[in-house]
């Protein structure tokens, strides 16, 4: 590992906010990353791991601890026990979009719809990133974890990570800590070998986003380039020359609500059904059984509703900014809070609070932030 002169976190995060921390270390190998984290945990020193910095809003006060910048990289192809598939083991600090490009160039399908998402591979499972119907949970096999509680390295199957809509047991949700504090060292994905010819795109959400008929066939390269173009049109592909991309992507999650609550929203609000969690098997003692199995009742599926629609129909349009603030909504996408140049973390947070309050007042729903907040309150 290499201790480096601390830099402002504004230079390491896509929201371009954050002061200079007390100490900064760069880890270029897994061994270095493990060693520095074990040292910090043993000393009880405050720590913050930064990869691509695309899912962080860091406060204006200096972070009083060590920032560990993850610089590990590398992709290893592994055989899969499933015919027609290949596994990729990817180091945590590897660029996610570079990984997608690698997969497309190799004719491997399963993550092309997530082209252009900023950040690193190690951060992808933490909030189960996704786009246009594809999510990491669909291809993730396992992760290599360094557990904070034990300092031990272990390989954990994806099924034990509690992967859900933009969540996992590893994510620090707003107002709470991770259920399993740990740092990802590498991830392993299993991707289908479709080659470079045309194939049928599965999933209505992805076909709809790409404008494809159900029987249309396209190449992986076409999917990637089309997704990149769609994301760029919304300011969701990083561009140093475009302040609309100086963001954390979608700042608020699309809300998952009960079907009953969804019916209280205007019918034109876009919505998508979310499959209910399966009911666990239950053994009912004979003396408690009255001829009706409560597990026979199938819960009405929850509904995911568009946060962008709620924001705009609460009267907050694209490009909105509070008076005198350098923070504003993207001029291309109402879900992106952007730094228009020189915005403080508090200005970004004030805008986020205003959006939350307006949506709650209009629709009775509190939007939840996607980024991890460090030294910032909403």
Image (cartoon, rainbow, N blue to C red):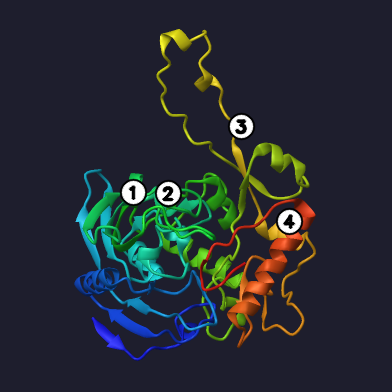
Q: Which mark is residue 163?
A: 2
| Residue 99 % position (x, y) | 35, 66
Marks 3 and 1, how far apart at CA: 27 Å
| Residue 142 falls left or right of residue 295 | left
Say which residue appears at 28% left-offset and 86% top-offset. 3
Question: Dividing the image into 4 quarters, which one contains the C terminus?
Answer: bottom right
User: Which-is-in-front pick, marks 2 and 4?
Assistant: 4
Marks 2 and 4, how far apart at CA: 27 Å
| Residue 362 % position (x, y) | 79, 55
| Residue 314 % position (x, y) | 78, 60
Marks 1 and 2, how far apart at CA: 8 Å
Under circle 4, the secondary element is: helix
| Residue 178 falls left or right of residue 359 | left
Marks 4 and 3, how far apart at CA: 24 Å
Say which residue appears at 66% left-offset and 54% top-offset. 306
User: Which-is-in-front pick, marks 1 and 4?
Assistant: 4
Closer to the chain start, of discs 3 and 1, is 1
Marks 1 and 4, how far apart at CA: 35 Å
Provide the residue designation for mark 1. Answer: 158
Say which residue appears at 74% left-offset and 51% top-offset. 364
Provide the residue designation for mark 4. Answer: 360
Q: Are marks 1 and 2 in contact (CB under 8 Å)?
A: yes
Closer to the chain start, of discs 1 and 4, is 1
């Amino acid at each position: 590992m290499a201790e480096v002169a601390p830099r402002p976190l504004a230079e390491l995060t896509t929201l371009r906010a954050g002061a200079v921390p007390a100490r900064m270390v760069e880890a270029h190998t897994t061994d270095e990353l493990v060693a520095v984290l074990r040292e910090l945990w043993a000393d009880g020193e405050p720590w913050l791991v930064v990869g691509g910095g695309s899912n962080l809003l860091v406060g204006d006060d200096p972070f009083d601890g060590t920032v560990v910048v993850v610089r590990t990289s590398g992709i290893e192809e592994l055989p899969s026990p499933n015919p027609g598939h290949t596994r990729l083991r990817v180091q945590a600090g590897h660029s996610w979009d570079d990984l997608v490009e690698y997969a497309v160039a190799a004719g491997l399908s399963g993550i092309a719809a997530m082209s252009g998402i900023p950040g690193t591979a190690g951060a992808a499972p933490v909030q189960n990133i996704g786009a246009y119907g594809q999510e990491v949970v669909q291809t993730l096999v396992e992760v290599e974890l360094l557990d904070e509680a034990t300092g031990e390295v272990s390989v954990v199957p994806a099924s034990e990570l509690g992967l859900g809509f933009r969540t996992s047991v590893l994510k620090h949700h707003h107002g709470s800590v991770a259920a399993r504090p740990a740092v990802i060292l590498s991830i392993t994905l299993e991707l289908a070998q479709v080659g470079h010819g045309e194939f049928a795109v599965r999933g209505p959400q992805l076909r709809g986003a790409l404008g494809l008929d159900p029987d249309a066939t396209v190449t992986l390269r076409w999917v990637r380039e089309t997704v990149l173009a769609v994301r760029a049109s919304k300011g969701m592909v990083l561009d140093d020359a475009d302040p609309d991309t100086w963001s954390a992507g979608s700042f608020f999650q699309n809300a998952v609500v009960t079907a009953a609550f969804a019916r209280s929203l205007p019918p034109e609000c876009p919505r998508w059904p979310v499959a209910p969690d399966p009911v666990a098997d239950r053994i009912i003692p004979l003396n408690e059984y009255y001829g009706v199995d409560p597990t026979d009742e199938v819960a009405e599926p929850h509904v995911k509703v568009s946060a962008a629609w709620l924001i705009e129909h609460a009267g907050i349009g694209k490009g909105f900014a509070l008076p005198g603030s350098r923070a504003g909504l993207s001029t291309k996408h109402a879900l992106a809070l952007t730094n228009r140049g020189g915005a403080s973390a508090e200005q970004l947070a004030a805008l986020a609070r205003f959006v939350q309050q307006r949506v709650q007042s209009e629709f009775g729903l509190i939007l939840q932030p996607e980024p991890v907040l460090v030294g910032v309150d909403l």
